[in-house]
Image: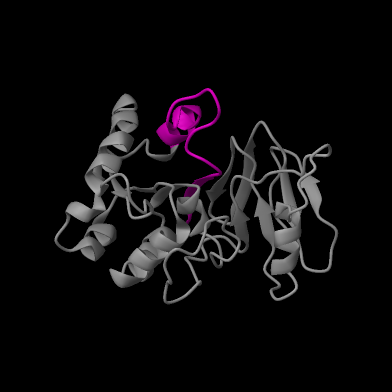
Amino acid sequence: MKNLLLASTSTIYGGEYLDYLTNEMTELFKDIEEVIFIPYARPGGISHDEYTEKAAMTFQKIGKKLIGLHTFDKPSEALKNAKGAFTGGGNTFVLVSALYRLELMKPLREAILNGLPYMGTSAGSNICGVSMQTTNDMPIVYPPSFKTLGAVPFNLNPHYLDPEPNSKHMGETRETRIGEFHTQNTVPVIGLREGSWLRVNGDEILLKGKLKARVFEQGEEPYEVETGTKFSKF
């Protein structure tokens, strides 16, 4: 019975870290006191301890204790025994590389499929897709595989941006990039705009937040789905 909260971002414009998700976090982690934080997405500039401390301040506001996975001698065992988990944003290549290097991808997937309340933002949401191949991040490290948790039957593109109609920029848009992905892959992609998230309960996947999401499927025109939509076709 999957129990997931997959958000496009940790911070929306004008807000504080995770504050727009406070009610959802409270509901997701309502039955537990301690949450494991997976801090491995940050490529530098902030230590795992500092990243955990930043996230822990928000969790304190909802009465939860956040513990960094990096502080455990046996992190795989910590995941197996965890009552809840949160993976923050950063660089998805760095995150996926660490999860494989530390042999955490399999125990995290098993925990999620067994009902672990899990929250991800940005890179932490990316890894719940079939693969990480629709991330926006630069490949600053080389993971052993692009395959990720497969907790949802599609890929995600967090921070999805629409083309600016008056822009003179001639580079590729997000839609163009996802179209390129679909020249080689059949996996559907959901573009999550800032301030939107997916709430997963079992096989039910619900779009929440104020904005629509954009859905991409191989060989089909992209289309919009309203907030409150259940992704039943996947």
Residue 114 visible? no
**Relative side of 124 to 226, left or right:** left
Camera-side residue: 94 or 71?
94
In the rendered image, residue 9 lying in the magenta stretch gets the answer: yes
Residue reaching furthest to the left: 73
Camera-side residue: 233 or 198?
198
Please tell me which residue is depicted at 78% across the width and 68% down the height of the picture: 218
Instruction: Tell me residue 192's x, y (percent).
Output: 64, 46
Instruction: Tell me residue 138's x, y (percent).
Output: 52, 59
**Relative side of 115 to 217, left or right:** left
Camera-side residue: 83 or 49?
49
Please tell me which residue is depicted at 38% across the width and 67% down the height of the picture: 97
**Relative side of 185 to 164, left or right:** left
Instruction: Tell me residue 58's x, y (percent).
Output: 34, 30
Q: In which quarter of the image is residue 130?
A: bottom right
In the rendered image, residue 200 lying in the magenta stretch gets the answer: no
Instruction: Tell me residue 77's x, y (percent).
Output: 22, 63
Camera-side residue: 152 or 2?
152
Instruction: Tell me the magenta residue range.
Output: 1-27
In the image, residue 198 sits, relative to residue 77, either above or below, namely above
Please tell me which residue is depicted at 28% across the width and 59% down the height of the picture: 79
Residue 190 visible? yes
